[in-house]
Image: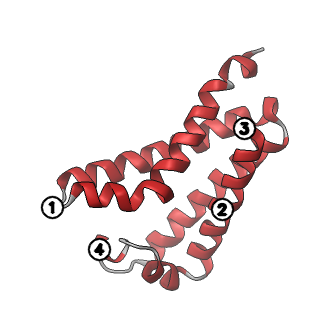
């Protein structure tokens, strides 16, 4: 099941990263809440798109070869978790924190939680 979840996450996050790299302005307007973070910055959007592609590659590697890909999964889970932490901080500092958390639940918090959980569950196997 872990491999399947990581494979799906890799596909979704990879597609998101590609869109951010090659259609960043469209992505900026299409993703709920992004416009509220400030003016469009194409360099920043492409930077984050690149991070999403690397994360997707790590998750895909784990889905393909769990034992060898586990360190890449950990790195991807770390990015996703830190990214989620930034969203928690922004929500806590905002005027409508519960709405912001709800908005980001599926796209930010769920992928981070799944990747982190899978990395922790497979930690013992990876050390063997």
* Element on which disc 4 rests: helix
Q: Are marks 1 and 3 in contact (CB under 8 Å)?
A: no
Rendered image quadrant of residue 2:
top right
Mark 3 neighbour density, 10 Å: few (under 14) some (14–19) many (20 or more): some
Which sits earlier in the primary sequence, circle 1 or circle 3? 3
Where does label 4 land, which residue? 36
90 lies above or below 17:
above
x and y percentages locating residue 74 in the rendered image? 61, 35
Secondary structure of the residue carrying tag 3 is helix
The residues bearing labels 1 and 4 have C-alpha atoms spaced at a distance of 12 Å
Residue positioned most to the top: 128
The residue at which mark 2 appears reads as: 12
Q: CA distance from mark 3 to mark 4?
A: 34 Å
Label located before the other in sequence (2 or 1): 2
> Left or right: where does residue 77 sit relative to residue 43?
right
Which residue, given by chain and number where applicable, does mark 1 sit on? Answer: 95
Mark closer to the chain start, 3 or 4: 3
Which one is in front in this view, the residue at disc 1 or the one at disc 4? 1
State yes or no: discs 3 and 2 in contact (Cβ < 8 Å). no
Q: Secondary structure at mark 2?
A: helix
Classify mark 1: helix, strand or loop.
loop
The residues tagged by marks 2 and 1 sit, at their Cα atoms, a distance apart of 30 Å
Q: Residues within 10 Å of mark 2 (few under 14, many from 20)?
A: some
| N-term-proximal mark, 1 vs 4 | 4
Label disc, if present, on residue 2 of the rendered structure: 3
User: Residue 7: horizontal and vertical position, in percent?
Assistant: 75, 50
Identify which residue, 22 or 97, lies in the foreground. Answer: 97
């Amino acid at each position: 099941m872990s491999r399947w979840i990581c494979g799906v996450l890799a596909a979704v996050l990879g597609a998101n990263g590609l869109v951010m790299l090659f259609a960043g302005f469209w992505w900026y307007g299409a993703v709920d809440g992004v416009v509220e973070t400030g003016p469009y910055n194409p360099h920043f959007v492409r930077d984050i798109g690149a991070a999403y592609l690397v994360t997707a590659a790590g998750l895909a590697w784990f889905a393909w070869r769990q034992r060898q890909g586990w360190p890449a999964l950990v790195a991807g889970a770390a990015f996703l978790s830190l990214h989620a932490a930034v969203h928690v901080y922004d929500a806590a500092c905002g005027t409508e924190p519960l709405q912001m958390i709800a908005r980001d639940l599926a796209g930010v918090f769920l992928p981070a939680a799944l990747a982190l959980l899978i990395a922790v569950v497979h930690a013992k196997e990876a050390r063997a």
